[in-house]
Amino acid sequence: MKEQLITGVTCLLIGGGLGFLAKGNSPAPSEKVEIEKNRAIQRGATATTSQARQEKLNSYAEITNQPGQTSRISGLIEFYSNLAGDQFAEEAEKLDALPFSERVLAAYLLFSSWAETSPTDAMEHARTKMGFAGNFVKPTVLQSWAASDPVGASLYFQENKSEFQMMSMMGRRGMRGRRGGGGGGDNSAEALIAGEWAKQDPAAALKWASELNGRGEGSRATASALKVLAKDDPRKAAEMLTNVDEENRRSAYQSIASEWAKSDWNETEGWIKTLPAEDQEEAFRAGIVSLAAQDSQLAADKVLGIEDDDIRNDAMGNVVGELAKQDPSGAMAWLMENGSEEGKQDGVGNVIRPWVAQDPQGALAWVSEQPVGPVRDSAVSSYIFNEQSGPATPKIELAETITDERTRDRALGIAVFQLIGEDQEAGAAYVEESDLLSERAKDRVLRRLGR
């Protein structure tokens, strides 16, 4: 369990914690379902070691007062793993008193442990005690539950689907992304359960997915299981595509291509050519995005073969970002030579970001030489967002040259807040006198200053 939680902490801090900012009334509770559970709960330490640990560090405050963030996380995992009964609820009640950044981490670790010992109690607490924020805890509970007892988690889901409607909506929206599918994954409840189940028993996960009868549930769950399977055996995952209905098969194609490309591009490309013609370029894009992380030069050659402008532009943005990690100047030259105007506008920020980190003066020189227009606007904005070491005034002057009002407002806002950090009065005076900041942007900054 410890390894799973430590891995999950990174994912949580990247994308999952904002829900704890929300407060609201609890939704009407649905009937609690009694589920016969058959699971072996793996504990992180022996009883003797756990008791000694509890005697030494027996509260959240004591653990978080220890030096070292890694030691604190390990201590919290140990502490929460040895709670029992009402102790979980008591610790959950203390979460609101924590600073936001600590609350997110503590909630993830606490509810992950709670779900392994008493998942229905953890789910009920999230549903009845946490208001709207409970919707952001349920995925943690469900994933931890499914990781140790997928049968129990699946039964709860089928009896309480209404509890997961928001989770499913967010999952499907996140899955579509800009181009739709392509390895990003589906965070709906059924996909989460199927993905965890497939790590333990792919055949059982696929069988369960095939029996789901809600709209799109079976396809999403099947695609998720196949994505997990593709990580180890993409050929077998490809053979199982017949279990995915037409509506969601495209996403499955992209998921398999994304995973397969990490191990063998030639086989991936050959398989893509066997797909329906209308689905090949999207699958090809998904494969190239993965290939770029392995062999950016090969990906750069392959991406130019995509005929659809939108799909090619999307893939080029990922490819040029990988190229830029090694040679930002060369990557920018490649983008300017091969990208459409839209592709250049979308991709230039992926080059500026690593360029600023490696050579901020070189990045600034390139940006300053660009002709007025959307590509330069994007480049200037990216430079200002990513360059944190220089003084604010030159960045303000640079941001003022952006022609698009919304882009200029965002870039000026970043530069102005930096100026405020250097000299609050000078920053406030600039905002009040500026003819380039929109009134909305001015109001936003001045409110932050209490004016």
Image (cartoon, rainbow, N blue to C red):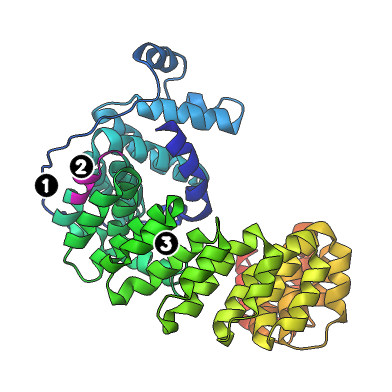
- Foreground mark, 2 or 3? 3
Q: Earlier in the sequence, mark 2 or mark 1?
A: 1
The vertical placement of 228 against 429, above or below, is above
Per the image, label 3 sits on a secondary structure element best described as loop
280 to the left or right of 372: left
Q: Give amino acid for label 3.
A: Gly
Residue 163: image tag: none
Q: In this figure, which residue is indicated by the disc labeled 3? A: 185
Per the image, label 1 sits on a secondary structure element best described as loop
Q: Magenta stretch?
A: 148-154
Q: Name the foreground residue: 207 vs 80.
A: 207
306 to the left or right of 148: right
Residue 33: image tag: 1
Residue at 61% over, 29% down? 68
Q: Give amino acid for label 1.
A: Val
28 to the left or right of 108: left
Q: Earlier in the sequence, mark 3 or mark 1?
A: 1
Residue at 40% over, 25% down? 44
Measured Cα–Cα span from mark 3 to mark 1: 29 Å
Residue at 31% over, 65% down? 220
Measured Cα–Cα span from mark 2 to mark 3: 26 Å
Q: Give amino acid for label 2.
A: Thr
Give the percent coordinates (x, y) of residue 420: 75, 62
Q: In this figure, which residue is indicated by the disc labeled 2? A: 120
- Asked if residue 414 can be seen in this view, the reply is no
Instruction: Decide whether the magenta segment is chiefly helix, strand or loop.
Output: helix
User: Tags 2 and 1 in contact by the CB under 8 Å rule?
Assistant: yes
Q: Name the foreground residue: 431 vs 346.
A: 346
